[in-house]
Image (spheres, rainbow, N blue to C red):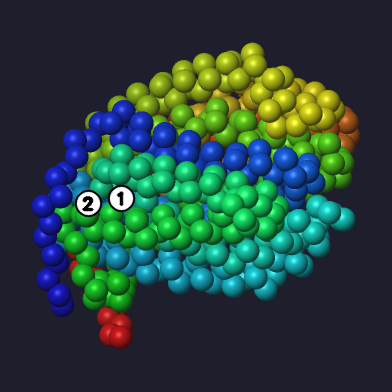
Amino acid sequence: MDAPHQTSAPAPTLGLFRLTWPILLELLLFMLMGTSDTLMLSGVSDDAVSAVGVVNQYIFLCILIMNVISHGASIVVAQYLGARRSAEAARISALAITLNLLLGLVVSATLLVLGDPILSHMNLAGPVLAHARAYMGIAGGFIFLQALINVLAGLIRTYGFTRQSMYVSLGMNVLHVACNYALIFGHFGLPALGVTGAAVSTGLSRATALVVFVWMLYRVMDVRMVPRDYMTFTKEYIRKILKVGVPAAVEQVTYHSCQTVFLYFVTLLGATALASRQYAIAISQYVYLFSLALGMGTAILVGRMVGARQPDEAYRQALVSLKWAVAITVLVDVLVILVRQPLVGLFTANADIVQLTARILLLSLLLESGRSFNLVLVNALRAAGDAQFAVYMAFVSMVCMSLPLGYVLVFHFQLGLPGIWLAIAADEWTRGLVFWYRWRSRAWERQSLVAPQEQTGTVALDG
C-alpha cells in the first residue's frame, strides 16, 4: 500500500467561535445563492418563483440522501483526529469521496429519468409546471456536483479549516450571482433564459467550486490521501460511516418528506399560499442560520472531544452552545418580525402575498426558538455517535404528531398556511426538549466510534 504523504499544514486552534463564524458566513453565502435565485426570478414572475421552490424541495431531499456519506464521514474523521490517528482519518476521507461520487451519480440519473413523473403528481399546471420541468432537467442532472462539494467541504471543516471553506463559498456565490444576472435576463450578449438560466448558473458555480475544494482539501490535511485510498473499501470504516450517516440522513429525509407533504397541502390552498410559503422560507432561513452554524461548530468540537476521551468537556460544550443558539435566534427573529412588511416587499408587490407572508413570519418566533434546540443538540448527539435516537424521535414527532396536526389545523380548523407553521413548531419543540433530556442523561457516552484497538477488513479494487 502507498505510504501516506505528510504535509506541513499547520493545525488551527479549535474553539467554538473560531470555528463557527466562518461556518456562519459560509452558510449565509450558500443561502444567498438561493435568495438571489428567488429575487431575480421574481423579476420574471411569481410562477417562476413557485416552480423553483417546488423543484428545490425535491433537490434538497436528494442532497440529504447524498449526505449519508458526508455526515457520517465528518463525524468519524473528527473522532479519529481527536484520537490522534491522522493516517486513518485520511483513508476514511478518501473512501467517503468515492462513495459520495457514486451515490451522487445514481441520484442525478434518477432525477433525469423520473423528474417529469414526480412533478406531474404535485398538482402543478400551466407556466408553473413548464418552469419546474426546465429547472429540474438541469439542476437535477448535475446534482452530483453538490454531493462532492458537501463531502469535501465537510471534511475541510472537520480538519478545523472553516475559514478556508468559507472563502470558496464566497467565490461560488459571487460567480453564481454574476451568472444569474447574465443568463436569467440576457446580459453581455447572452440570451434571456429565465428559469433555465438560473439552473445553468447553479451548475457552473458548483463545478468551479468543486475544483477549488479538491485542491484545498489536500492543502489542509496533515496526512494526505494517496490514490490507492480512493479504491480501498475498508469494511469497518464503511460500517462506522453508515452508523452515523444513515440515521442522520433518515432523520433529515423524514423531516423534509413531511415538508413535502405540507407543500402538497399548500398547493391545494392556491397560488398565493404557495408563493407566500416560498418567500417566508427564504426569510426564515436567515433566522435559524446562527443555530445551524453553532450546531455544526459544536459537532466538530464534540466529535474531537469524544475521540480524545473527554466526555465531560463535550457535555459542557453542547450546553454552552445551546444557550448561545437560543439567545441569538430569539434576537434575530424579533428584528425580522419588526421589519417583516418591508422585508417581504423586497420580493413581491402582490398585496395578498405580502400580508400572508407577514402573518407567517409572526409565528416564526415560536418555531425558530424550538428549532434552535434541535440544531445544536442533534448535531452534538450525532458527533458523539448517538445518531439512532434522533431517527426514532423523528418518526414519532414528525410523522405521528406533526403531520396529522397540520392536516387538522389546515383543513378542519381552516387555518391555512399558518396552521402548517404551528404544526411544524409543535414538532420542533417536542424533539428539542426530548433531545435536551437525552443529552443531560449522558447516554451518548456509550456510543464512541473509535475503539482503542481495532481490527479492520479491507477490500482493495485495483484499477
Kind of residue indicated by mark 1: Ile
- Asked whether the beta carbons under mark 2 and mark 1 sit within 8 Å of each other, the answer is yes
Residue shown at 55% from the left, 31% from the top: 286
Q: Quadrant of the N terminus?
A: bottom left
Q: Quadrant of the C terminus?
A: bottom left
**Up/down of 297 relative to 126, above or below:** above
Instruction: Tell me if residue 222 can be seen.
Output: yes
**Residue closest to the eye, 183 or 373:** 183
**Residue closest to the eye, 399 or 283:** 283
**Up/down of 16 relative to 305, above or below:** above
Q: Residue 294 in the image: x percent, y percent?
A: 40, 32
| Numbered mark located on residue 220 in the image | 2
Residue shown at 70% from the left, 66% from the top: 115
Instruction: Indicate left or right for 304 with 167 as reference.
Output: left
Instruction: Tell me if residue 444 can be seen.
Output: no
Q: Residues within 10 Å of mark 1 (few under 14, many from 20)?
A: many
Q: Residue 297 in the image: x percent, y percent?
A: 35, 36
Q: Secondary structure at mark 2?
A: helix
In the picture of the structure, the residue carrying the numbered disc 1 is 156
Q: Residues within 10 Å of mark 2 (few under 14, many from 20)?
A: many
Between the C-alphas of marks 2 and 1, the distance is 7 Å
Kind of residue indicated by mark 2: Val
The earlier-in-sequence mark between 2 and 1 is 1
Q: Secondary structure at mark 1?
A: helix
**Which picture quadrant has residue 116?**
bottom right
